[in-house]
Amino acid sequence: MTQPIAKRFATPSIDQMPDDIRARLLAVQEKSGFIPNVFLTLAYRPDEFRAFFAYHDALMDKDGGLTKAEREMIVVATSSANQCHYCVIAHGAILRIRAKNPQISDQIAVNYRKADITPRQKAMLEFAMKVSSEAHAISEEDFTAVANHGFSDDDIWDIAAISAFFALSNRMANLTGMRPNDEFYMMGRLPK
Amino acid sequence: MTQPIAKRFATPSIDQMPDDIRARLLAVQEKSGFIPNVFLTLAYRPDEFRAFFAYHDALMDKDGGLTKAEREMIVVATSSANQCHYCVIAHGAILRIRAKNPQISDQIAVNYRKADITPRQKAMLEFAMKVSSEAHAISEEDFTAVANHGFSDDDIWDIAAISAFFALSNRMANLTGMRPNDEFYMMGRLPK
Amino acid sequence: MTQPIAKRFATPSIDQMPDDIRARLLAVQEKSGFIPNVFLTLAYRPDEFRAFFAYHDALMDKDGGLTKAEREMIVVATSSANQCHYCVIAHGAILRIRAKNPQISDQIAVNYRKADITPRQKAMLEFAMKVSSEAHAISEEDFTAVANHGFSDDDIWDIAAISAFFALSNRMANLTGMRPNDEFYMMGRLPK
Amino acid sequence: MTQPIAKRFATPSIDQMPDDIRARLLAVQEKSGFIPNVFLTLAYRPDEFRAFFAYHDALMDKDGGLTKAEREMIVVATSSANQCHYCVIAHGAILRIRAKNPQISDQIAVNYRKADITPRQKAMLEFAMKVSSEAHAISEEDFTAVANHGFSDDDIWDIAAISAFFALSNRMANLTGMRPNDEFYMMGRLPK
Amino acid sequence: MTQPIAKRFATPSIDQMPDDIRARLLAVQEKSGFIPNVFLTLAYRPDEFRAFFAYHDALMDKDGGLTKAEREMIVVATSSANQCHYCVIAHGAILRIRAKNPQISDQIAVNYRKADITPRQKAMLEFAMKVSSEAHAISEEDFTAVANHGFSDDDIWDIAAISAFFALSNRMANLTGMRPNDEFYMMGRLPK
Amino acid sequence: MTQPIAKRFATPSIDQMPDDIRARLLAVQEKSGFIPNVFLTLAYRPDEFRAFFAYHDALMDKDGGLTKAEREMIVVATSSANQCHYCVIAHGAILRIRAKNPQISDQIAVNYRKADITPRQKAMLEFAMKVSSEAHAISEEDFTAVANHGFSDDDIWDIAAISAFFALSNRMANLTGMRPNDEFYMMGRLPK
């Protein structure tokens, strides 16, 4: 149903990619059963690809005060505010799986204020949204509000850095017309 | 998974509803297998309920230049701009069914500009979005732009009136904390 | 002075209207001495006309915690924010009469914060304006703020529903280029 | 009906004003039958008063390509966008008189796009509104659009300067809670 | 490096200016070593020139609770929000000199919330910015917030009036494409 | 003059940094004579530091259709829109040096539309600003507008990617209260 990736920036064939990038693509294909389009689209620029995924992994795959589901909540909420087709649908899928909750992504994408999340998670998303839309006005009050829910300074850095990283990611996805793979739409919606 | 309807405005028991309203609820339950929460929530005010659904039916169930799927596209696009939890998820379900397309609602909700729709449908949504967000600035240029895609004056009225009606509906749903029934999340996502 | 109603959507002749609609128009003409253009414009679509006025009457002609003047204040304030020519001028006339105050409508249309109204009425308009412009962000704090001025939950529904209904009405008036009748400009400005 | 001028910035008694300011107030009272509150409020600061009215007179009382009614249209349109109580009501009165049109001010205050004015006047107001709300983005296209309606460079300066002067005036009126005199509400609404 | 003043509104030759205006230009040239372009540009309209500088001097050259540096802070902060080329660069120069601080202007122009200023000065700028961008919503809370930092009512008038005057000034500078003289860029950046 | 880096996220001592990060800091100190605070602040998180600078270098230090000065123009324009203290002042310094133009950075920071740049550079900044503020609405018209000035698809990727990368960078700088080093303020302002 989805149209092919926009051809303005051509996806290189996997054979012609640098070895490390091809290896990453094959690894993700092995694990997921398909290659998410973000890998194919960004492979257009190998150096940027490497930095992008190094940054992504540093923020999303680490341990810390935020669960992996909570990290994905930040991605879905801020990407929806940025109207990022790829990120909302692909990370919505990941969030459903991480949270083991088939409804959470749709709820957060539409209006996180009404989603079935904890007050602590709402405070987390409030802070992330402020970083996303008006970081210049972040004040001590904002830090205090989120810290009052038990987030450490390191957690707050994580919340903000994920929001900031997807500010970049959303813009690249909108530039390239990056499209979510068909597989993402149903992932995590049915019980295993 | 969803929390019960916000209790500020109590849903009357079906037994205590006026006969005509109870009849409508039972009919929709018969047809759909459940009673969408919009019926229960708005039954709090019987006269407003009757007017709301009379208006809804006049716009959504009629024949005309817009298909039923296209009418639902307008609902999903404008309700997403208004961050209306209930309307995006419930009408997203209806749109998937009407369009026989499991991806279309998520695409339109995130960014209709990137959705897999025709240029004519994009022009329809542009007009609907302008009615939704800055109707005071609608100009002859806007009418011409949508008319150039083959929409008649009556079609344009329909596009605008659906957008306008859901401007009302979205606000009531946000006021009441109206929640989509669990059933909506999966409707139309799997082949029959 | 005013130009005729925009001809894109032709006003049917009164003779050709359905009986119930013609009856309503004649009744309002009998009472007011003229037929407000909203009746003529919306008669283009009889079913929508019936639902529109049923909704209107359910909200504006009922008893309850809000006076009729207060209901009209909500209409004028939100319609002015929506830059709705017809609604500000026609309902401004009605508000002057209901409030027996020749200045109140102009004051509220320009800046309700500076109008000669009570703090309770200002709180009412604050809530109505939030429903009008960002209903998705209504929070418990907003409910508390308005409830603190003595408004019941039913009053709050009324405030919000009037704001929501005129969100619809303003958009239809802007779509159709609906013009206020000349009579409205002077109504309620002179002592009887 | 209007409340007295806000007391934060006390109006000096006329006796204690500098001679030239008192003379101006008495002259306007002689001519108009009352002293518009802008004179009383700004007399709080004599030097600013003198500069304000010198600027005002240089822009509003001169000859040139704009009629006096057109100058007042700019004041009403931009002051309404700035939600300036005093300026919309007081200059709305002056506009009705200058234009010999009892409806024009209400129309322009609500939505100048729908007012009964000429295309040339709409172009004039478009330019004035851009100066008012986003002067930083004025482009050659904007100059061309207004010049195409026959406005000379000097006319364009006038349009912009009136918009800019009332950007100042509106802010001072909102700061001081300046209230229109009761007399303004009815001025120019009835045939002489 | 800078291009000549935009030629749409021709700068009169100094010889042909009225005596009082020529005298002022020569005086400022004597004092500063050059004639700031605002004098040349506005001399296009002698009467407006006289009113403009009379207003300017009444606000900027007086004694009172605000230091001259603080007055310039207001100019730089609000002119930056209005994206006024001339005012940010010319008054940035004056602020550096008045504050004897080579960094303060760049800091305030980018984001006054992060500048090296006192909490009292931040409160002053908050109030000035509200006057600049939404004067219609100034409330008692805003007055209280700034008064709590020790500003008198007369100081508050000054803060607001400077913000309001540069609302005018910024719009005229953007209209005319007024360019800062080359001299301003380096003024106050090096120790004397 | 500048205050120390905000202590919420402590800068590690250079001795305790990982070897590769310490080496980069010493190299930049060797070259520039000081260590820009962005290196110290981001060293708080070594993995993110590495990804950040790898991304930065991939975009800013490469060859291609954009000069290094033009790349910095994009940084200054978008960082100013995001009110990023550090980025405007630090990259403003770099831009002055790259462009050998002591005025260009202040001009672009205030209002790039009025800066002394070529029409081609203005088109470049228009595209970069759209990516920065509303990437979701980028259309074929936007691509065409910038391509018409001779930018290749690869150049357009660069323009967008720099804008997107600094969307991330600006948010991190605002989060951490990152302050520009004193050295940046004067760099490139005086002839060598």
Image: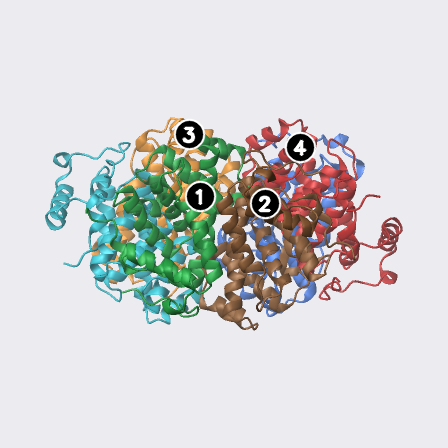
Chain colours: A green, B cyan, C orange, D blue, E red, F brown
> Mark 3, mark 2: which one is toward the viewer?
2
> Mark 1, mark 3: which one is toward the viewer?
3
Question: Is D139 left or right of C87, judged from the image as shown?
Answer: right
**Disc 1 designates what residue?**
A129
> Mark 4, mark 2: which one is toward the viewer?
2
Label 2 Cα neighbours within 10 Å, binned few <14 / some 14-19 / many ≥20: some
The amino acid on which the numbered mark 1 sits, given as a three-letter code, is Met
Earlier sequence position, callout 1 versus callout 3: 1
**Disc 2 designates what residue?**
F22
Q: Are marks 1 and 4 on the same chain?
A: no
**Gap between marks 4 and 2 measured at Cα:** 35 Å
Q: Chain of mark 4?
A: E
Q: Are marks 3 and 2 on the same chain?
A: no
Residue E118 marker: 4
- The answer to whether one can see residue F73 in this image is yes
**Gap between marks 1 and 3 measured at Cα:** 18 Å
Q: Are marks 3 and 4 on the same chain?
A: no
Label 3 Cα neighbours within 10 Å, binned few <14 / some 14-19 / many ≥20: few
Q: Chain of mark 3?
A: A
Q: Quadrant of the N terminus of chain E?
A: bottom right
Q: Secondary structure at mark 4?
A: loop
**Gap between marks 1 and 4 measured at Cα:** 28 Å
**Disc 3 designates what residue?**
A150
Q: Is residue F22 above or below residue B145?
A: above
